[in-house]
Image (tube, rainbow, N blue to C red):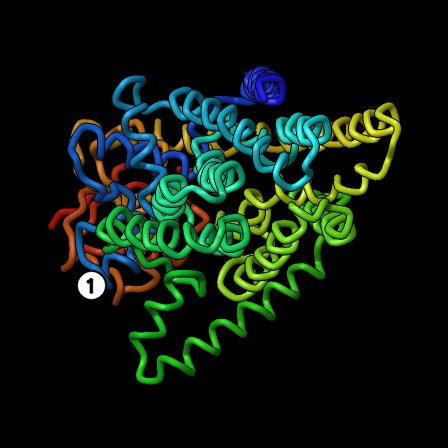
Amino acid sequence: MRLPRLSTALCLLLVMVCAWLAGRRAIADSHLLPAWPDECIYLVGARNLAERGTLDTHFYLTHSLLRLGHPHRDVHLPGYIAVLAPVVKLRGATPAAAAELNHGLFVASAAAFFLVALRLLGERPLATAAALLFVVLPPLPAYLAVAYAEPLVAFGMLLPLAIAATAPTRMAAAVVAGLLFGAALGVRETLLLALPLHLVLFERRPLLRGFLPAAAAGALLLVAPFAGRRAIHPNALFPSVLTDALATDSPVSALAAALWGNVTRNLALAAQARPFQDVEDLLLLFLAVLALGAVLGVRSLPAAGRRAGQATLASLALLLGAVLAVYVIRGRGGVLGGVRAFLPWAPLLLAVALAPLLRLRSRLAQAAIVTVIALGCVELDRRQIYFFNRYRASDHEDQERFARLLQRETDAARPHRVLARAFLYGYERWPVEVIWQLPRDARELRELERTVAFDVVAVHNKSADQRRLFGNNPNYRRLNRPDAEYIVWRRLQ
């Protein structure tokens, strides 16, 4: 018995070392800049929690303020902020701190995936190869240097599965896995759709008496109390679509119309995909190929792993339906897109897709195929990181220019709350609050003025409708030239 255990331990060590090295390389190739809106929101949210003990956000939407009042929480679930907060407390609210957390989660996820792949494939060499492919498997490596929840989502998916895969008959393991599964729903609600995997991995008794009650307890005790009072984004996406539907006279028909509208919009977007011009579309194509490989490979799994492989495909089908109905298949307007939604399922699809290699007697042939896959993954990673770097650098430059202008024009007034799409300014000028979604018309502006106080307004010169709201308004005094890139007003009353 000692030799198999030693062999497994050595494989785990190899996987973790490779993941550590690959993670460092991916972070080194990226720009550690607070660039994207969600990065600023997450980092400031973690600082709020670490220093003030509150989950209330500092970034608001006018639409949400008018519905919920002030203060309330961010639209995102609070799990990532809760995990990031201790790191921010120790290392500061910086992208580097987020990257350190992501790196550690990445290494732990690689180890967890090895254990899952071992259960699926039943063979250490191929499970090790699958886990080594995990460290270069798109799209996760590109997110290691971004203050996003994706590495935590992957870890939250894989850790309970690793426990289920290694201890399917033990009650204590089922309880721990259930608690972790329930808690992970506080990071991304789509992880609930991984439930079919646990239903087949655990034996009946620990499943019914351990995992399921613990999962319910984890969700109700660790997530539900902190997931309320979340912002409402004015689009037909979860959970806003539910909130908006319940506010109508016919909630069922309103919900059905919103869901069907999102399905048709997603199908139209999918038909417009340009995988050879757009990196996100290329990654979606890669994930589709991976899913097809899993469909073809599930019959090649050994008997012990076949039910888990089938559950992986069933879980993926549920996720695809959810993405089409209440999310987006291709990212639009910074909203969670299909690439990020499917990300935690990619390793499982990889393991199932590799199952046909079990039929090859030649280890050399297996190694050659795995090497070709690895090289393709590395190229996709390179392209994705390059795209991220250009995208983030451009966004950071625009936001930095805006932040410097706001500082010049308003720092003397020491504003407490600004009405401007100024994420970097809000990140740098903590605890200043930012209302980043401006009113659409005079009615919304009047309602916003009655709802919450704010000191400064700034809009882009090209935003003619927004300029008219404040340009001839006696309640606001312009602070800079009318031909500036961003026009700044101070609120007088």
Query: In screen coordinates, is 153 left or right of 283?
Result: left
Residue lying farthest left? 493
Q: Picture quarter containing residue 444?
A: bottom left
Task: Compare residues 134 and 336 and report the one nearer the observer.
Answer: 134
Tell me, yes or no, if residue 421 can be seen here: no
Residue to which mark 1 is pinned: 447
Residue occupying the point 36% across, 38% down: 80
Query: In screen coordinates, is 37 left or right of 4?
Result: left
Residue occupying the point 71% across, 54% down: 273
| Residue 105 percent location from the top left of the image | 46, 28
| Residue 139 percent location from the top left of the image | 61, 37
Secondary element at tag 1? helix
Q: Residues within 10 Å of mark 1 (few under 14, many from 20)?
A: some
Q: Quadrant of the N terminus?
A: top right
Query: In screen coordinates, is 288 left or right of 46?
Result: right
Q: Picture quarter containing residue 94?
A: top left
Amino acid residing under circle 1: Glu
Residue occupying the point 26% across, 56% down: 472
Residue occupying the point 15% across, 33% down: 52
28 vs 328: above or below: above
233 vs 276: above or below: below
| Residue 202 percent location from the top left of the image | 49, 49
